Amino acid sequence: MRTATRRITRKDIRQPDRFVVLVRSFLPYAKANRTALLAAGAVVVILATALFGWDLYRTRQNRLAAEEYARAVDLYHGGKYKEALDSFNRLEIYRSSYYSRLGMLYKANAQSALRDTNGAVETLRRLLDGEKKDPLVRQSAYVSLGYTQEQRAQWPDAAQSYSEAAKIAGPLKSDAALAMARSYAEAGNSKEALAAYKKFLAENPDSDRANEVSVRLQELEAKTAQAAPAK
């Protein structure tokens, strides 16, 4: 149903424009508070300039980080681990860049390749302490930490690291779950190892590694059954 349109009368036309009224009412205030308004305007200009400058700074830092990251990764894949470590160390000064966090993963792997497992563990723990949001970086760091702890025969610690990685939805979840089961088995914790293998098969029945895991599970069950009478 259409509503009647209100007609504009001569009286309405004579009414002063609202914008004009607002401007006229603001002018006395502006004159009385000229210094304060100028100061506020200066603050706005300074903040805008600072934000623009910060954006330029971050863009430049990210570009430099990307260049350093590319150099370091090339050295790493070329097997030049010592030179790669120097480059990854330089990369860490760009802390706000994503490339810096990725570089720490490579740095830990380079340290492990040079048998510096203590350094690798320290690097990975610093990465996990500093990166709380990115699930892929955290999952990769936990897997790398678990692998390094395996190299040190720290099986319970490795199992715990792999367990943390397996809790994160990501591309390394199933690998972490199997590594966790393997670490429990190496630690002599057959109960947790059996539970981990069974859970993997339940969650990944169509996995390419399902047959392999089934064989491991059967072997571990047989080993556990043989050890039971001896206790």
Image (tube, rainbow, N blue to C red):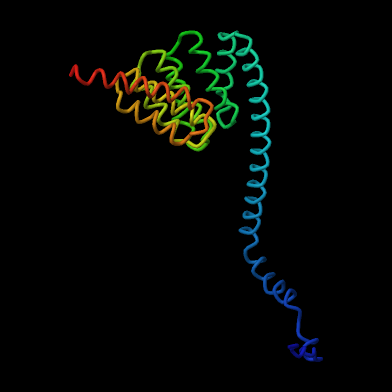
Q: Please, is residue 13 above or below residue 206 in the view?
A: below
What is the quadrant of the N terminus in the image?
bottom right
- As drawn, which residue projects farthest toward the left? 231
In screen coordinates, is 205 left or right of 63?
A: left
Q: Please, is residue 24 above or below residue 226 in the view?
A: below
Can you give x and y, in whole percent of width and height, for residue 34 in the image? Answer: 65, 61
Q: Nearer the viewer, residue 169 or 200?
A: 200
What is the quadrant of the C terminus in the image?
top left
Q: Nearer the viewer, residue 66 or 186?
A: 186
Can you give x and y, in whole percent of width and height, for residue 84 in the image? Answer: 59, 13
Q: How many marks?
A: 0
Q: Nearer the viewer, residue 71 or 182?
A: 182
In screen coordinates, is 15 left or right of 84?
A: right
Q: Residue at x 75, y 88 (%)?
A: 2
In screen coordinates, is 215 left or right of 24?
A: left
Q: Please, is residue 212 above or below residue 55 in the view?
A: above
Q: Residue at x 48, y 27 (%)?
A: 210
Can you give x and y, in whole percent of width and height, for residue 180 in the image? Answer: 40, 25
Q: Please, is residue 205 above or below residue 151 in the view?
A: below
Q: Could you say which quadrant of the image residue 125 lies in?
A: top left
In screen coordinates, is 189 left or right of 40?
A: left
Q: Could you say which quadrant of the image residue 71 lies in?
A: top right
Q: Residue at x 48, y 13 (%)?
A: 112
Q: Nearer the viewer, residue 212 or 195?
A: 212
Can you give x and y, in whole percent of width and height, for residue 212 in the image? Answer: 47, 22
